[in-house]
Amino acid sequence: MAKSRPTTQASKSSPATCFRKWMLRAALFGILCVTCGWLDTIKEQWYVFDPPFLHELAQEAVVAFPNNPEGMIQHILTNLTTTYPQPSNTISLNTNSTEWVFNNAGGAMGAMYIIHASITEYLIIFGTPLGTEGHTGLHTADDYFHILVGEQWAFRPGALEMERYKPGDVHFLPRGTAKQYKMHEGCFAMEYARGWIPLMMPFGLADTFTSTLDVPTLYHTVRITAREMIKNILIGKI
């Protein structure tokens, strides 16, 4: 007489059980979507920086230290630490202006100095003395790119003429939009983004895994960003 086969776990799963599992997953996904949508409506309460203030600060730096990126950066830091004295229970700033790391993203390469990084905002100095070109990325944050030195060109699909940004100008990129951009030789900018910053990080790190394999830069980028985000979380800055 043939022996009966032991019943496997897979055979025990009934259609009703599978249906309940998928309904639970759908419910959890729906709750996640609703939660994210709600958080998106209240994220403004965690913003500290004011775009018009930063634009004015960048323009002041351009006038005070023309064609002098180092002087501009020190001017920006001095004004920021005067406005937001450190240590602060409102916002944490990284005042170590020697802490630069390479940044490869969207095919473009430069270096950045992270002044501030939190869940909803970041403020950096980005640029290169050599020039670079690439894709801006498609982000979940509004991006304000304040030109300090040099010149940036930009273009979006369908445009027949390029956008040109010079020192003192701000290139505003609303979230959900993308462009091709080019930074000419000796171009540096102060970049401010407000929105969900962690969701921007895959774009900022992807080239490391697909192209450069620059592990030390990856380590320092993650280390500095995580350190600054944690410092801000600890004082209640989301």
Image: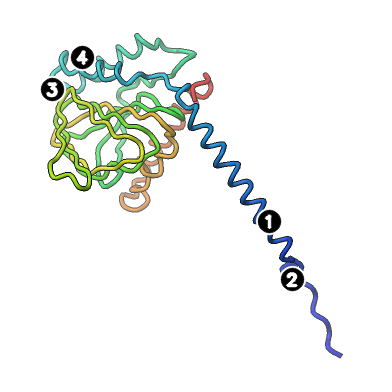
Depth check, mark 4 against mark 3: the one in front is: 4
The secondary structure type at the circle numbered 3 is loop
Depth check, mark 2 against mark 3: the one in front is: 2
- Dot 3 surroundings within 10 Å: few (below 14), some, or many (20 or more)? some
The residue pinned by badge 1 equals 21
Q: Which corner quadrant of the image does residue 183 belong to? A: top left
In the drawing, does residue 167 fall left or right of residue 75? Answer: left
Q: Position of residue 31 (x, y in %)?
A: 60, 41
Q: Amino acid at mark 3?
A: Asn
The secondary structure type at the circle numbered 4 is helix
Q: Is residue 112 above or below residue 218?
A: above
Q: CA distance from mark 4 to mark 2?
A: 72 Å
Depth check, mark 1 against mark 3: the one in front is: 1
- Of the numbered discs in the image, which one, if any, rests on residue 67? 3
Q: Are marks 4 and 3 in contact (CB under 8 Å)?
A: no
Q: Amino acid at mark 2?
A: Ser
Q: Amino acid at mark 4?
A: Glu
- Dot 2 surroundings within 10 Å: few (below 14), some, or many (20 or more)? few
